[in-house]
Image (tube, helix red, strand yellow):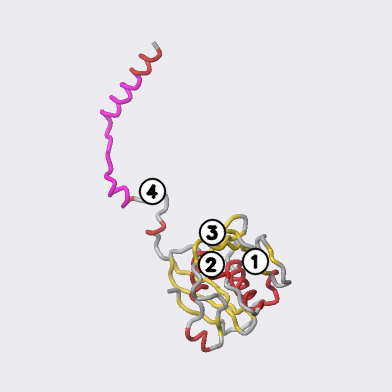
Amino acid sequence: MKRVVGFVLICLALASCARSNLVIIPKSELRRIGNGLYGSNVQNRSPNASTVRIYLVLGTRLVAVDRTGRSSLSAPELAMRELLKGPSKPEMDRGITTNIPDTVRFLDIGTNNNVATVDLSHDFEITTSDRTTFLLRLAQVVYTLTEINGIQAVRFEVEGQPVSVLVQNGTLVAAPVARGRYSDYAPVSLGQSVSTGPLV
């Protein structure tokens, strides 16, 4: 008897749908509508005015450099992509450089509990005979990402694998690292002449 009742209810429901003003939306239209049904579509996000501060190198210290323009990227991703581009020609003319090899590729970034986890390609691990050069490379990333609101420390990955990083006292640290680990390389002040450049 229960099966018969259930069957009757299903039939009544189907009949009700058949009499309703049911509208079938083609898949192409769903794609156009997009956000309301499937959540945000990052590829269709409109570019917004953005300013990010990245940290390059001047001598044996970091230096803050601003990048301004329009971008649809998240702040952490935008900051890392701008950092890996290195200094502009006018910045290089002022002696500003980067210690991150130009072959390093940005792979991914995520944030959780005030920690950014950044994933970079193997070339980021290329060591040099000068320990300061390598420490400045790490400091560039740490200072750049912790410039962003909500990020207090950075965890490094290489090709998706967590790695320990060198800190200024010469030890290797597996935990997330904050600015204090690289305070010896804190940015020099350029007063009112902070270098700026466009987002590309």
Residue at image x 27%, y 39%? 24
Give the dominant element type of the magenta stretch: helix, strand or loop: helix
Amino acid type of the residue that numbered disc 1 sits on in the rendered structure: Val
> Residue at horizontal 28%, vertical 43%?
25
Q: Position of residue 184 (x, y in %)?
A: 70, 76
Residue type, mark 2 in image = His
How far from the left and from the top, in percent, is residue 57? 59, 80
Q: Which of 77 and 147 is in front in this view?
A: 77
Q: Can residue 152 be seen in this view?
A: no
Name the residue carrying label 4.
Answer: 36
For numbered disc 3, what is the local secondary structure? loop
Mark positioned earlier in the residue sequence (1 or 2): 2
Q: Give the secondary structure at mark 1.
A: strand
Return the residue at label 3: 160
Identify the residue position indicated by label 1 in the image.
Answer: 165
Q: Residues within 10 Å of mark 2 (few under 14, many from 20)?
A: some
Amino acid type at image mark 4: Gly
Residue range highlighted in magenta: 9-32
Q: Distance between the residues labelled 4 and 3?
A: 33 Å
Left or right: where 18 falls relative to 198: left
